[in-house]
Image (tube, helix red, strand yellow):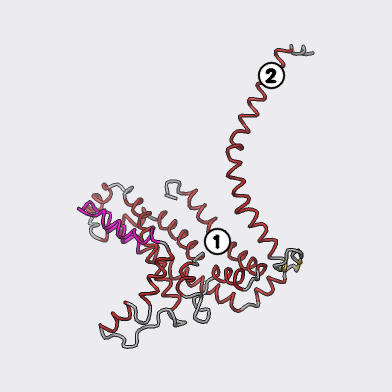
Amino acid sequence: MASPLSPEHASAARSVRTRVWLSRLAPYLFLAPALLVLGLTIFYPALNAFYLSFTQFEFDITQPPAWVGTANFQRLVRDPIFWQTLRNTLLYLICVVPILVTLPLGLAILVNRALPGIGGFRAAFYTPVVISMVVAGIAWRWLYAETGLLNQLLRWLGLSEAGVPWLTSPQLALFSVMAVTIWKGLGYYMVIYLAGLQAIPADLYEAGAIDGSTGWKKHWDITVPLMQPYLLLVAVISAISATKVFEEVFVMTQGGPRNSSKTMVYYVYERAFQDLELSYACTIGLVLFLIILGLSVLRLMLRSESPDLPG
């Protein structure tokens, strides 16, 4: 039988266990404030929104939400405006993402040169990124106006006397909003590509020049294959951003004309804060959440496979 510990040894053992327990608890104590804020601002609202999507919520503090099961989802399936906003959102993805994947790469290649004043060009391309989307939307709305700069330029060139209804035509409104998203995102994705380009050794281009790979051909043979992880990353990030587009639509078109530029996020806002149908808005938001979750998981997978990628 083991002899019992002396009081001194027992006290020392308890002190060691206490220190070990505190050392294990310390990281969680540091994380507790952040976890509390995240829980109150993100996790609890998200879970509550999930619950509300199965209820009928009335703005009456004396009446709890009434459980309706899948009624909101059945209504969603029959809602033509929802399907139109879903098509608009998917069209946004199809049109905007390829441009934001390819065009910023070309800009990054152009500014990735050791030339006098090249920093000014980089800053000029990046300036739209730091401009508020509200300010950018108002400015572009003025440009798109009937008497705006774009229509005045078309009249001066003799291309259109009546002007182009950029924001009032159901066929053009969504594409006009897309142009603002592309203009604002070019500089951001250019910087991501620039970081990747500067990590490519110059020796590879010198070796490629010996094999006859010069001019733009060297970028096709060397740059594009080595930048593939960055291309995939930008594709996922721009897809998530295009799925969540809201400010451009809110400032420029309010979803019109005839819902032609209404996206899913704007439809959630419209149902929740204009029509006060909070439960139905949560149902739409749940579908949007699943789409963004899939894109986010894809981004995390790319990040784990390429740990050197930025962001």
Q: Which residues are magenta?
A: 103-131
Residue at image position (31%, 88%) is: 161
Closer to the camera in the image, 272 or 231:
272
Per the picture, the main secondary structure of the magenta-coloured stretch is helix
Residue marked by disc 2: 13
Residue 162 location, x and y as percent? Answer: 34, 88
Q: Residues within 10 Å of mark 2 (few under 14, many from 20)?
A: few
Residue 229 colored in magenta in the image? no
Residue marked by disc 1: 292
Instruction: Please state if 41 lies on the left or on the right of 58 as rendered.
Output: left
Closer to the camera in the image, 129 or 137:
137
Instruction: Please state if 265 lies on the left or on the right of 69 as rendered.
Output: left
Q: Secondary structure at mark 1?
A: helix
Residue at image position (74%, 65%) is: 65
Q: Amino acid at mark 1?
A: Ile
Residue 115 colored in magenta in the image? yes
Residue 218 location, x and y as percent? Answer: 27, 57
Q: Amino acid at mark 2?
A: Ala
